[in-house]
Amino acid sequence: RLRGVVALDGPSGTGKSTVSKKLAAALGATYLDTGAMYRAVTLAVLRAGVDPADTAEVVRVARAAELSMGTDPLAPTVLLEGAEVEAEIRGPEVTSAVSAVSAVPEVRELLVALQRELIAQARTDPGGMVVEGRDIGTVVVPDAGLKVYLTASADARAARRTAQDVSDGRVSDLRSTHADVQRRDALDSGRTVAPLRQADDAVELDSTELDIAGVLEQLTKLVESRG
Ligand code: C5P
C-alpha cells in the first residue's frame, strides 16, 4: 500500500476539489487535480477548432499539447503551452466537451502516464499527495493508502456547482447545471474505459448533509486511521 497517497474520486459537485485542496494543505501534502488535466486537453481541442467527437484529431491535439501541472494546494496551476488556463478550463465550453474528450482511450493513456509521473515524484515527499478525479482509486493509483469515494445527491451537487459558478463570476442557473451534472455523470459512468465507479476498497463518504468543514473532519479521521 502506498502510504501518503490519498485518492479522492466521485462525481462532480460533491465538493471534491474544495475538500481535496484543504485536506492537502492541512496535511502538508501536494495536490493533483486530474480533472483539470482533462479540461486543459479539451481546451486545446477547442482552440484547435477540432470537433470533440473526432477521435483521431482529438488524439493528435492531445499528443501535441504541452501541459504542466503545479501541485501546491494553496495555488494549484494548470499551464497549457506555458500559459495559465485555470479560468478558461472552468468555462461552459470546456465543461460541455470534456466528457467526450476524456472518453477517448488514447487521451486517458497519455494523461494517466503523466499523472503517475507526478505521483511518483510525490512518493519521496514526506507530506504525500492528495489526488482527485474519477478513476484514481480504480486505475491511476490502485495501491493508494487511502481511497475515498465522495458522493452527494444530484440536487445537492447541482446547487453546489451553481453556487461555485456564481462565486467565480460565471453565469449559471440551477436547472441547466442540474441537467449538466446528470449528463456528465451518465457519460463518465457509462464510458468503456475507466468509468466512474467506486473502488472495492474505497470508503464511501456521502456529503449531502455535510458542509465543507464536516467533510474535512471525516477525511482527516480517515487519514489518521488508515492513510
Ligand atoms: O473534476 P472535474 O469536473 O473538473 O472533471 C472534468 C471531467 O474530466 C469529468 O467530467 C470527467 O469527464 C473527466 N475526468 C476523468 N477522469 C478523471 C478526472 C476527470 O475522466 N480522473
Image (tube, grey):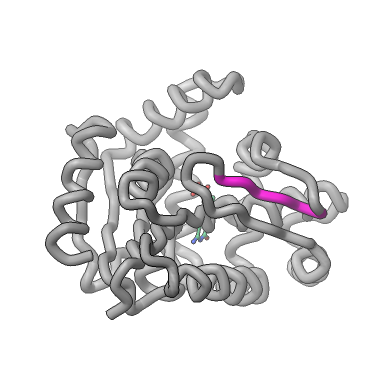
The span shown in magenta is 76-81
Q: Is residue 187 above or below residue 160?
A: below
Q: Residue at x 18, y 41 (%)?
A: 217
Q: Residue at x 83, y 47 (%)?
A: 47
Q: Residue at x 61, y 42 (%)?
A: 95
Residue 132 location in percent, x, y? Answer: 43, 56
Q: Main secondary structure of the magenta part?
A: strand
Residue 208 location in percent, x, y? Answer: 22, 36
In front of the other: 129 or 141: 129
Residue 27 location in percent, x, y? Answer: 32, 51
Q: Is residue 55 above or below residue 1?
A: above
Is 79 placed left or right of 3 in the picture? right
In front of the other: 155 or 164: 164
**In the image, residue 66 lies in the stretch drawn in magenta:** no
The single residue placed furthest to the front in the displayed view is: 126
Is 3 placed left or right of 33 in the picture? left
Q: Is residue 89 above or below residue 3?
A: above
Question: Residue 104's image quarter?
Answer: bottom right
In front of the other: 161 or 28: 28
Question: Residue 113's image quarter?
Answer: bottom right
Q: Residue at x 45, y 57 (%)?
A: 133
